[in-house]
Structures are given as structure tokens and as C-alpha cells.
């Protein structure tokens, strides 16, 4: 494999790890809990900006041409962890505004509006994150220990995979625990979950903040690989790429989400980049979004549960039973069956 092809492969692998962290976080909110977070990209971007600021140092140390709030030289991996914490802190007021008091469609609209507002603020306010120019020259972690950029690229693939593995344990620990059952109960019916004594607002806020922290980690991991981040990197439409990956792979399902990441943001988006340039400049990029929209609509119409549907579980006698289409129940007459 040529060095150029290796660079391309390592970039895709890093992108896969970053996207899978983000999609697992969004699926925890949307697929498991039922939170319509159409502003998810905000928290990935907050993590990216924070991950950059926590490694760039002060403005004067960077020649003074970049203007941003704060600045520090945190060692790796503390810069990534700090970025996740900042994203979680930002999620608290947003969650109280758009999650605790609103439901359903209104929740989705508010989160989408907040995403549009955040992009405009990042563009207009130069002193916050350097305006439309964004942040650049972000130091790559541990790069001083390697002699070639290709060798470092493969090492960063391993580092990003470690962060993805940590995200897996966090999300899996939540969804496989009794907490996961409460979250699914909230998704199915908030009123029924509340009647059972579940504090719906508290549970949703907890998941919203945890998902935001994971999104922040994904952004920090990505910006420290790219070396730059600006408003053009996080258009609000990017959130719908993650939603499409969840719909295609299967909601409430970590394996399905991983498959969706491999198919949508990796395979599908990369294949469309090789389309011939026809029509006006930028038409291929516009066509890419059209095809992503069509892909989501097709799955929502014909396979709404995705390629790997969420496994449904029922309980009887304290034991978890796998779903069966026709299980004979004791006490029913011959030929009668009931699904459990």
C-alpha cells in the first residue's frame, strides 16, 4: 500500500472512531431515551473548540493572530477529558431550556434553532473562537515522539480507537443496567414512566449531559488530529448525518449504530465524493446531501427499525426471554398462540 493510500486509510479509521463515539452518544439520547436532540453538533463543536484551546495555550503564545477565550497547555489526555467536561457544562443550561420543559416536536425545533444560533454566534463573535477563520495550528498530542507523519497517523488511529472503546463501555454500562430499562420506559411513554415513579426530567437531563460529554470527547479527538476547526466544520446539517446512521443501522442498538457509521458517514459519503463534477460548482456536494436525505426517507418508509433492529425483551418469572413470533402460552387452547 502506497504512503498516500495509507494516509487516506488512517484518516477514514480516525473518522470512524470519532463518528462512532458521536453516534453512540446521540443514540443514547435519541434511540434509547427518546430525546430529539437536533442540536447535537453543538456539543461536538464545543468539545472541538475546547480541545483546541486547551492545547493552544495563550493568544500571545500563538502570535496573537488567533482570538479566543481562555487558553492552556493541558497534557494529553487531560485536554480531551477537559473538553468533554466543558461540553457537559454547556449542556446543562441548554438541557433545562430545551429538554426539561419541552417534549416531542417542540424539543426538536428548539434544539435545531439553538444549533443555528450557535453557528451564527461563532461566526460573528471574533473574540470567542476566532470568528469565521476558526482555530488552527492545534498541536497534535505525542507527535514529538515519532519521526514520520505516517507512523504517527497509525498511532493516532490506535488512540482514537481507545477513546471509542471507552465510549462503548460508558454507553453499554448505561443501557445494560437497570438504568437502561428506565430510559427505554421514558422513550415509550413518559406519562407511564412517571406513573411508575421514574423522575423523567432528571433521567433525561442526566442522559443529555452524558451524551454531550461524549460528543465533546469526539470533537476534541478529531480536532487534535485535524489541527483546525471552524464554523464551516460543523453546519447544523451534520447532525442529520448522525441521525441517518442511526436510522440505517437501527435505533437503540450499539451494533446497529456502528454499522450505520460504517455505511453512512464513511462508505456512503466517501463514495459520493468520487462523483464526476457536473453542472455548477458545488453541485456534487449538494447532491450528496440530497442522497443522504433520500437514504433516510427510504429506511424510514420501508425499514424503520434499521438493518439491525433493537432486540425486544419481555420478562416472566424474573427471567429475560428472547422474542419469539409464536410462543404457546400455558392455559391457551390448542392452536392458539401469543407473542411474548
Image (cartoon, grey):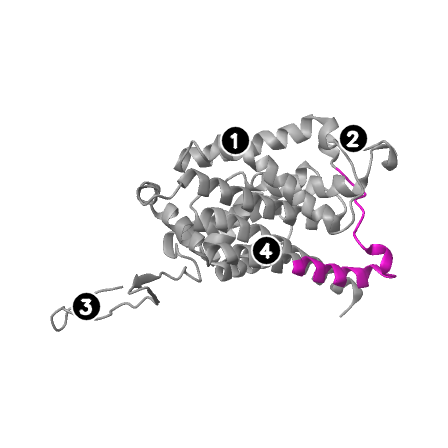
Where residue 227 appears, x then y in whole percent? 77, 46
> Which badge, 4 or 2, is on the more N-terminal residue?
2
Q: What residue did someone put label 1 on?
A: 113
Nearest the camera: 277 or 151? 151
Residue neighbourhood size for the residue with mark 3, other residues' Cα within 10 Å, grouped as few (<14), some (14–19), many (≥20): some
User: Which of marks 4 and 3 precedes in the sequence?
Assistant: 4
Residue 330 seen from this side: yes
Q: Residue 3 is drawn in which quadrant?
A: bottom right
Q: Earlier in the sequence, mark 1 or mark 4?
A: 1
Q: Dot 1, crowdedness within 10 Å: few (<14), some or many (≥20)?
A: few
Whole-angstrom CA distance, mark 3 to mark 4, is 41 Å
The tag on residue 67 is: 2
Which quadrant of the figure has residue 313?
Answer: bottom left
Q: Secondary structure at mark 3?
A: loop
CA neighbours of label 2 inside 10 A, class few (<14), some (14 to 19), many (20+): many
Mark 4 = which residue? 167
User: Of circles 4 and 2, which is in front?
Assistant: 4
Query: For residue 337, which numbered disc appears in the image?
Result: 3
Point out residue 141 in the picture as x, y percentages from the top left corner.
79, 52
- The span picked out in magenta is 135-162
Q: Position of residue 226 (x, y in %)?
A: 74, 49
**Is residue 245 shown left or right of residue 128?**
left
Dot 4 lies on which element? helix
Amino acid at each position: 500500500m502506497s504512503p498516500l493510500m495509507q494516509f487516506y486509510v488512517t484518516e477514514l479509521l480516525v473518522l470512524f472512531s470519532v463518528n462512532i463515539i458521536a453516534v453512540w452518544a446521540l443514540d443514547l439520547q435519541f434511540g434509547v431515551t427518546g430525546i430529539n436532540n437536533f442540536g447535537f453538533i453543538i456539543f461536538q463543536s464545543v468539545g472541538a473548540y475546547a480541545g483546541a484551546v486547551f492545547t493552544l495555550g495563550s493568544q500571545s503564545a500563538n502570535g496573537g493572530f488567533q482570538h479566543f477565550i481562555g487558553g492552556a497547555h493541558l497534557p494529553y489526555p487531560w485536554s480531551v477529558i477537559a473538553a468533554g467536561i466543558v461540553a457537559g457544562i454547556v449542556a446543562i443550561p441548554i438541557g433545562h431550556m430545551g429538554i426539561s420543559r419541552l417534549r416531542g416536536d417542540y424539543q426538536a425545533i428548539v434544539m435545531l434553532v439553538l444549533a443555528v444560533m450557535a453557528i451564527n454566534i461563532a461566526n460573528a463573535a471574533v473574540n470567542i473562537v476566532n470568528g469565521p477563520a476558526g482555530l488552527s495550528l492545534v498541536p497534535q498530542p505525542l507527535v514529538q515522539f515519532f519521526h514520520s507523519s505516517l507512523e504517527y497517523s497509525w498511532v493516532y488511529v490506535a488512540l482514537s480507537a481507545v477513546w471509542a472503546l471507552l465510549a462503548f463501555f460508558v454507553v453499554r454500562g448505561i443501557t445494560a443496567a437497570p438504568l437502561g430499562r428506565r430510559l427505554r420506559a421514558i422513550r415509550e411513554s413518559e406519562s407511564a414512566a412517571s406513573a411508575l415513579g421514574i423522575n423523567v426530567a432528571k433521567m433525561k437531563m442526566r442522559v443529555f449531559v452524558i451524551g454531550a460529554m461524549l460528543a465533546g470527547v469526539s470533537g476534541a479527538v478529531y480536532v487534535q488530529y485535524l489541527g483546525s476547526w471552524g464554523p464551516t466544520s460543523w453546519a447544523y446539517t451534520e447532525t442529520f448525518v448522525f441521525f441517518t446512521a442511526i436510522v440505517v443501522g437501527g435505533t437503540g442498538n450499539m451494533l446497529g449504530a456502528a454499522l450505520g457509521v460504517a455505511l453512512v458517514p464513511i462508505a456512503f459519503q466517501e463514495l459520493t465524493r468520487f462523483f464526476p463534477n457536473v453542472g455548477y460548482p458545488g453541485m456534487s456536494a449538494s447532491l450528496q446531501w440530497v442522497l443522504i436525505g433520500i437514504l433516510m426517507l427510504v429506511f424510514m418508509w420501508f425499514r424503520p427499525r434499521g438493518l439491525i433492529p433493537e432486540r425486544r425483551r419481555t420478562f416472566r418469572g424474573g427471567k429475560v426471554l428472547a422474542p419469539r413470533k409464536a410462543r404457546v402460552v400455558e392455559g391457551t387452547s390448542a392452536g392458539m398462540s401469543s407473542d411474548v
